[in-house]
């Protein structure tokens, strides 16, 4: 929680966001996870979900997994006005990427993954 007044806190937050965008390609996976939040929405028995998780692990991109068969996960999505047509889906800093965007056939678009989390 920021103890500064709201204007100063907002300015500080914007400065930090700019610094993170500028230097995030240099951050280690552990430090990157402090700034760039990556969440994978999965479902049971989903081969593409496993492929996406494997690709993220191979690229050293830390992520949180959320199973859409869990009612709490679905309730959170609905409360945020997010409706998934299919899994997997990837959320990076509040931006949602669909399965169609993440895959070329059965192949994960690893270059897209690197791009969306700021890895070159």
Image: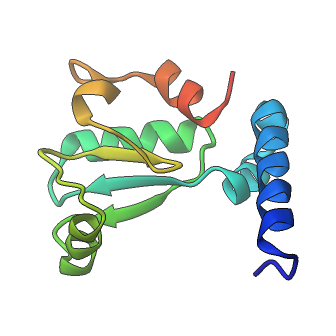
> Residue 89: image x %, image y %?
30, 45
> Residue 6: image x %, image y %?
77, 71
- Determine which quarter of the picture holds residue 85: top left
Figure disc tally? 0
- Determine which quarter of the picture holds residue 70: bottom left
Q: Nearer the viewer, residue 61 or 116?
A: 116
Q: Residue at x 76, y 60 (%)?
A: 10
The colour scheme is rainbow
As displayed, is residue 105 above or below residue 10? above
Q: Nearer the viewer, residue 1 or 103?
A: 1
Residue 52 falls left or right of residue 112: left
Q: Nearer the viewer, residue 112 or 92?
A: 92
Residue 96 falls left or right of residue 20: left
Q: Quadrant of the N terminus?
A: bottom right
> Residue 37: image x %, image y %?
57, 54
> Residue 114: image x %, image y %?
58, 28
As displayed, is residue 77 above or below residue 17? below
Residue 112 falls left or right of residue 107: right
- Determine which quarter of the picture holds residue 2: bottom right
Q: Residue at x 17, y 50 (%)?
A: 84
């Amino acid at each position: 929680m920021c103890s500064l007044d709201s204007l100063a806190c907002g300015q500080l937050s914007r400065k930090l966001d700019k610094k993170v965008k500028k230097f995030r390609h240099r951050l280690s996976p552990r430090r990157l996870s402090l700034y760039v939040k990556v969440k994978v929405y999965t479902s049971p028995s989903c081969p593409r979900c496993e492929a996406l998780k494997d690709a993220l692990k191979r690229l050293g991109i830390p992520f949180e997994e959320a199973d859409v068969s869990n009612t709490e996960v679905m309730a959170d999505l609905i409360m945020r006005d997010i409706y998934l047509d299919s899994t997997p889906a990837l959320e990076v800093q509040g931006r949602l990427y669909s399965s169609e965007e993440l895959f070329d056939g059965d192949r994960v678009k690893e270059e897209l993954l690197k791009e969306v989390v700021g890895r070159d």
